[in-house]
Image (cartoon, rainbow, N blue to C red):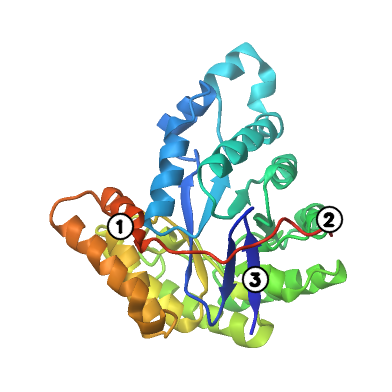
Amino acid sequence: MTRTVIESKSKTVTIGFDEPFCVIGERINPTGRKKLAAELEAGDFSTVEKDALEQVACGAMVLDVNSGAVFTNKMAEDPRYADNNFVEPMLMKELVSRVQALVDVPLCIDSSVPGALENGLEMAEGRPLLNSVTGEEERLEVILPLVKKYNVPVVAISNDDTGISEDPDVRFAVAKKIVERAADFGIPAHDIVVDPLVMPVGAMATAGRQVFTLVARLRDELGVNTTCGASNISFGLPNRHGLGAAFLPMAIAAGMTSAIMNPIRAQEMEAIHAANFLMNHDPNGGQWINFARVLEAHKAGTPFPDAAKAAAAGGGARGGRRGGRRRAG
């Protein structure tokens, strides 16, 4: 079975068809979060640190670290700050350093800027996940050598130079192209985690069915693990967490093995724990029973992150297999 191995200095997380669903915490991302971007511009990392600790307590097995901040005030003082190629590499180093000093889960290094990706790879202890490569020729030629050099797995997003297709067959073809091009660099399929691109169901009624079919094809025909931005499915709709809680178990049943998502949402995390149990990825229901205690406290009025932290302090936290440092490419 396909297994994608991600490591921190002390923990190993395996993404696979016969493994528990991998929750990749999305919150360390200043994109669309003006308050967080302003804090980072001022050198304040308190929200980043809070988000790191809370996400891990709530069940994140990997933390996405995104450096896509816009430093509006500094632009006025120094025109270099208008260029993400200047801002993101130095910010990524600081983010990775601070996050891995607080938590021991593996990281997902996330940026559109190659220099930021390389800085994140240099700073990360263990074997992080790289986010991301696309089917665009320029991106393939820049990112795949990084993946090979640092011997890390990579998220492959199913769009190319023509953009994002609404046709799932086209998105599958892009994923296949990325897997084949990666092989030319000596990168195995088990180190490619495909994001088939989840469309908003409010804009495209077939979006859910499309992704379930795509995920099954990616598993059966390419043998790759998959991920997605889970919140995309509910974009623009009311009761987004209800939709997310329905979407995630259906995607898991179709073969999806991970998602970049907000773990500080009890409803979605309950759905994932239930799916793990029902898919026989939670032996004897141990994690389901532990999570039920968290839910009891949460329903009694304790904020979900606080209930999760208390359960972890009491010995109910998810363990990780011991891992090593990043292997040489």
Residue at 85% x, 69% y is 186
Quarter of the image where the C terminus is located: bottom right
**Which residue: 66% across, 15% down?**
78
**Residue at 61% from the left image edge and 38% from the top image edge:** 97
Which quadrant of the figure has residue 168?
bottom right
State the residue position of label 3: 4
- In the rendered image, the residue lying farthest to the top is 77
Residues 65 and 133: in front is 65
**Label 1 environment density (alpha carbons within 10 Å; few <14, some 14–19, many ≥20):** some
The residue sitting at 61% across, 12% down in the picture is 77
- Expressed as whole percent of the image width and height from the top left, the position of residue 86 reads 70, 29
Q: Nearer the viewer, mark 1 or mark 3?
A: 1
The tag earlier along the polypeptide, 3 or 2, is 3
Q: Name the residue under label 1.
A: 311
Distance (Cα) linking label 2 and label 1: 40 Å
Mark number for residue 149?
2
